[in-house]
Image (spheres, rainbow, N blue to C red):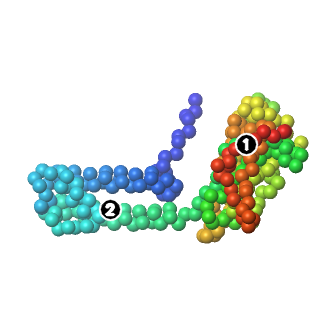
């Protein structure tokens, strides 16, 4: 029996793992690494006992001496006296400089990394649009900056059985009425018409669930401020595709014609004929 594939470890691509980690998680990992390294060096200083000015057999003094050394603070109250302690100070000071340089680059990379804040509707719906049964979902740009040359790619995936009896997942690209827009500023409703040539033709909610169907949405474009490519993704399983529903209208207009979005109704759906 073949062994199950191993899950990739974060350490196989540590840089991208750290850059993609949320800020709270990254700060907690940095804090844990900082405390661990100082705890280890503090233990070595405590075992050697070669730090002048520390209280006798005081591990906290050794820990905070390690903190001062790693941060290159050097108050002068505590200082090494033995060869072993001086060697540890040299190693720790080097590690502190390298760690500071790495953290500076990592923080800069996270701050300078453009990202899209695109909200997708909770459900995709199937109902008539212009008299044609259509699959629809909604997106909204939550950033003040706009996304230029935005493009949406919609993929339909389901489990199928081949003529040989092999079960596999197949993918189909679903064309949209409008796949590109030069300026994505507010809201965008993507529409796929379910024509006789569509993979969704003749499907029902039950058939999609039986085939473990899924919709995969990928949006790419250029962030207006930095002119760098940003992307957003979303998935709809069969339970998130509602038949005989339409998306509620969320756009209102001020007296001067300025459109406003009512995000409180962004995920709201209404009954509609198929």
Q: Nearer the viewer, residue 162 or 20?
A: 20
Left or right for 10, reference 211: left
For this orientation, the residue located farthest to the left is 56
Q: Residues within 10 Å of mark 2 (few under 14, many from 20)?
A: some
Marker disc for residue 34: none
Is 72 or 90 nearer to us in this picture?
Answer: 72
Identify which residue is drawn at 74% across, 38% down.
Answer: 242
Which tag, 2 or 1, sits closer to the chain's start? Answer: 2
Q: Is residue 163 visible?
A: yes
Q: Is residue 91 visible?
A: no
Percent of width and height locating residue 196: 89, 42
Quarter of the rendering containing residue 187: bottom right
In the shown orientation, is residue 165 left or right of residue 129? Answer: left
Location of mark 1 (residue): 269
Tell me if 166 is positioned left or right of 68 in this view: right
Q: Which residue is mark 2?
A: 95
Q: Are marks 2 and 1 in contact (CB under 8 Å)?
A: no
Q: Nearer the viewer, residue 249 or 137?
A: 249
Front position among marks 2 and 1: 1
Residue at the (76%, 52%) spot, across then down? 190
Above or below 133: residue 211: above
Query: Can you say which quadrant of the picture contains the N terminus?
Result: top right
The structure residue drawn at horizontal position 74% and vertical position 47%, both measured from the top left corner, is 248
Q: CA distance from mark 2 to mark 1?
A: 56 Å
Q: Is residue 1 above or below residue 35?
A: above
Quarter location, residue 160: top right
Residue 260 percent location from the top left of the image: 69, 59
Mark 1 element type? strand
């Amino acid at each position: 029996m073949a062994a199950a594939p191993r899950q990739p470890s974060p350490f196989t691509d540590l840089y991208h793992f750290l850059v993609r980690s949320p800020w709270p998680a990254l700060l907690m990992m940095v804090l844990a690494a900082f405390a661990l390294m100082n705890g280890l060096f503090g233990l070595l200083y405590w075992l050697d006992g070669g730090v002048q000015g520390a209280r006798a057999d005081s591990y906290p003094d050794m820990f905070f001496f390690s903190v001062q050394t790693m941060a290159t603070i050097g108050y002068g109250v505590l200082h090494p006296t033995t060869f072993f302690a001086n060697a540890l100070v040299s190693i720790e000071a080097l590690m502190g400089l390298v760690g500071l340089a790495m953290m500076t680059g990592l923080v800069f990379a996270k701050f300078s990394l453009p990202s899209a804040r695109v909200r997708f509707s909770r459900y995709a719906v199937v109902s008539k649009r212009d008299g044609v049964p259509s699959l629809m979902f909604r997106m909204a740009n939550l950033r003040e900056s706009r996304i230029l040359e935005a493009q949406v790619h919609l993929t339909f995936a389901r489990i199928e059985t081949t003529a040989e009896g092999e079960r596999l997942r197949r993918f189909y690209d679903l064309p949209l009425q409008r796949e590109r827009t030069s300026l994505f500023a507010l809201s965008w409703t993507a529409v796929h018409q379910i024509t006789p040539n569509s993979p969704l033709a003749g499907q029902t909610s039950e058939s999609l669930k039986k085939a473990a169907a899924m919709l995969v949405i990928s949006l790419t474009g250029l962030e207006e401020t930095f002119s760098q490519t940003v992307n957003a993704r979303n998935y709809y399983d069969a339970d998130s595709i509602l038949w005989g529903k339409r998306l509620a209208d969320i756009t209102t207009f001020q007296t001067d014609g300025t459109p406003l979005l009512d995000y409180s109704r962004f995920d709201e759906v209404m009954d509609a004929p198929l």
